[in-house]
Amino acid sequence: MVNITPEAEKFIDELMEKNGKVGSGIRIYLSGYACSGPQFGMSFQQGAGEGETTDNSSQSFEIYYDSETGEALKDCVIEFVDDPNFGTGLSISNPNFSGCSSCGGGCH
């Protein structure tokens, strides 16, 4: 089950409305790994694809992901961020992951 904050859910709802995607779901996919852990991408999608899990963590849309992405999402939180240095948008982070030794654990 995906952990999504109410602020992130509201942000996604507003994106769907602005983009004419009301009624769609969000597909989360694993796009690779970095020193800060797994990296994810998101896209709008109508219904689960073959082999994808349908997650009903959100009250207003479904979330879809494959088994590999589901494993990487374990313990992760989808949050809305509004940071003057990094911009406004969504962040998927794992509070249990502190980075790797090759970059001093200081990755964010």
Image (cartoon, rainbow, N blue to C red):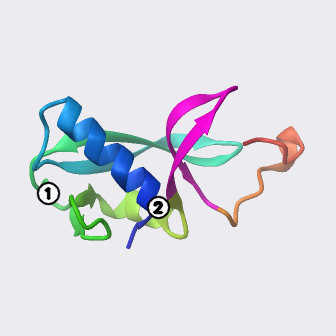
Where residue 24 sits in the image (x, y, percent)?
Answer: 13, 48
For the record, the magenta segment spans 78-94
Does 86 sit above or below residue 74? Answer: above
Does 1 sit above or below residue 15? Answer: below
| Crowdedness near tag 2: few (<14), some (14–19) or many (≥20) residues, C-alpha within 10 Å | some
- Is residue 87 a member of the stretch shown in magenta? yes
Q: Residue at x 45, y 54 (%)?
A: 7
Dominant secondary-structure state across the stretch colored magenta: strand
Task: Say whether residue 23 is left or right of residue 32.
Answer: left
Q: Which residue is mark 1?
A: 48
Q: State the image quarter where residue 62 is shown.
A: bottom left
Q: Residue at x 69, y 46 (%)?
A: 36
Task: Say whether residue 34 is left or right of residue 101.
Answer: left
Q: Quadrant of the C terminus?
A: top right
- Is residue 30 a member of the stretch shown in magenta? no
Q: Nearer the viewer, residue 26 or 72?
A: 26
SS at circle 2: loop
Q: Nearer the viewer, residue 107 or 91?
A: 91
Task: Say whether residue 63 is left or right of residue 21.
Answer: right
Q: Which mark is residue 5?
A: 2
Q: Residue at x 71, y 43 (%)?
A: 35
Lower sequence index among marks 1 and 2: 2
| Amino acid type at image mark 2 | Thr
| Amino acid type at image mark 1 | Ala
Q: State the image quarter where residue 44 is shown.
A: top left
Q: Nearer the viewer, mark 1 or mark 2?
A: 2
Q: Nearer the viewer, residue 34 or 20?
A: 20
Q: Are marks 1 and 2 in contact (CB under 8 Å)?
A: no
SS at circle 1: loop
Where residue 16 sits in the image (x, y, percent)?
Answer: 21, 39
Where residue 101 sits in the image (x, y, percent)?
Answer: 86, 48
